[in-house]
Image (cartoon, rainbow, N blue to C red):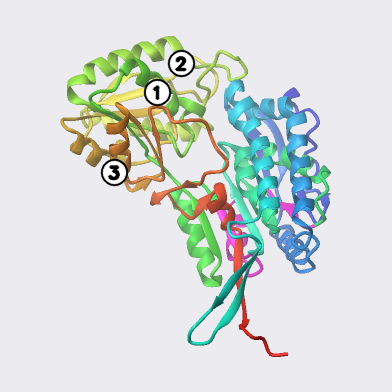
Amino acid sequence: MSDARLTGLDLSATTYVDGRWRPGEGEGFGSVDPATGRELARWTGSSTTQAEAAIAAARASLDDGRWARRAPAERAAVLRRIADLLEADHERLARLVTAEVGSPITLARSLQTATPVANFRWAADMAEAGPRGGYREHLPAAGPPAASESVLLREPIGVVAAITPYNYPINMVAWKVGPALAAGCSVVLLPSPRGTLCTLAFARLAAEAGLPPGVLNVVVGGADLGRLLSTHPSVDMVTFTGSNAVGETVMKAAAPTSKKVVLELGGKSPTVILPGADLARAVGPSLLRFCRNAGQGCGATTRIVVPRDRMEEFVAAATAFLDEHVPVGDPTDERTEVGPLISAEHRARVEGYLERAVADGATLAYGGDRPDLAGWYLRPTLVTGVEPGHEICQDELFAPVAVLLPYDDVDQAVAIANDSRYGLNALVWGPHEEAVEVALRLETGTVAINGGGGARPDVPWVGAKQSGVGMEMGSDGFAEFFTVKHLQWPAEPVA
């Protein structure tokens, strides 16, 4: 470990099983700063034998009830201690996110590290409140055919495998591990190799918070561990965030053992600019939404649907805004808005899409080039002159690239917005009543009207179409971590 931003992160032991840190016994990995291309650290992943041990530890902790049978208030107290420890270590964690993922430091301090604190506190509140209907719900006597009374018991679903992506490494842990622990589940956590350092930093704080041994286990490494977690008969649920290709693999792997699967997958989300929209108000937020975290976000709104007769006006306003308000550069600089992409390979993949689009007649109205910087940067890019069915309009790029698609009437705008195999997120700008009408017609899980509001842990993040299966966060997402047992007896029970 050679980078000052990793001070205090011990990488000699990278596997956390049954309350003990152990040296990895698997493959060697290198973590690289995407802003410079320099290696941050080398670490050793977990072996499949260690992953088996993690699953066994989680199963043992579940079966003996050391966590699941604790009073909800006790579970909540531990989750609040996790939140407090994250908050106290906020600045170091933010700088670690910036080093490992390339997120600009201002974003690292907010969505990357402050938001997980709020999400763990929400999970603590949910542990105390219980799932919708309560942990134990009494139903009134009912009949015919035979009058009976019933109780619904909502119990933790079991051992949860949580597989997280690199782009929001700590917050995605909060989304998965927080509700799972609140429900009383035991967890095996596997982060993306590109988000491992941040996850290990989180895990060391969580280990201080008072979780019983075996309740939270952490293994690190590659796809072989993901396959094991997805197929192992002692794992009851897999919650995964990542690409559709890997999500499909997870679902197929989980099928033989009938595991519950929650998948948060890709997006190609639209921004719909209605004819009456105030461009001075709409342009900036629309651009920032697809540039945030260098476009490496599943909810990035990368298809901007614009009235044909306002396209020239939109491009001019967008170009001026990008020039003035969206600087690209060193993510440790507080003025930076767009940092690097995660790897050289990923940037080359994105550039391939741009090259093919131009070859097919598209125009790069802005950007598309590399700034003169050492890391894996790509300037924010606006693409015009493409049809909605082109690959660059259909595939998730995970980059600060948006296509501008013209329309002639609102029905066509809605059709273009819905012309996607994804359905995760959307923005609509325009007079409120008209914007609401359009929002109701969009095939997507979330729609922000005229900017919407901030992130809320108490509402679900859910994908339509191929953007996912199941929900995360909110009471609906919390319910994913429970199973229901029905007890019933005659209305006049036998002595």
Residue 461 in the image: state x and y as whole percent: 49, 45
Mark 2 closeness class: few <14, some 14–19, many ≥20 residues within 10 Å = many
Mark 3 closeness class: few <14, some 14–19, many ≥20 residues within 10 Å = few
* Residue 287's disc number: 1
Q: Is 198 left or right of 443, judged from the image as shown? A: right
Q: Is 44 left or right of 305, judged from the image as shown? A: right
Region in magenta: 214-239
Residue 162 falls inside the magenta stretch: no
Residue 359 in the image: state x and y as whole percent: 24, 30
Cα–Cα span, label 1 and label 3: 23 Å
* Residue identified by numbered label 3: 441
**Cβ–Cβ under 8 Å for marks 2 and 1:** yes
- Residue at the image point whose x is 48% and y is 30% from the top: 453
Q: Amino acid at mark 3?
A: Arg
Q: Which part of the image, by quadrant, shows the N terminus?
A: top right
Residue 327 in the image: state x and y as whole percent: 48, 14
Kind of element beneath mark 3: helix
Q: Nearer the viewer, residue 286 or 363?
A: 286
* Residue identified by numbered label 2: 326
- Residue at the image point whose x is 22% and y is 27% from the top: 385
Inspect this view and state whether residue 20 appears: yes
Inspect this view and state whether residue 221 appears: no
Q: Nearer the viewer, residue 58 or 77?
A: 77
Q: Earlier in the sequence, mark 2 or mark 1?
A: 1
Kind of element beneath mark 2: loop
Cα–Cα span, label 2 and label 1: 9 Å
- Figure check: 185 above or below 402: below
Q: Earlier in the sequence, mark 2 or mark 3?
A: 2
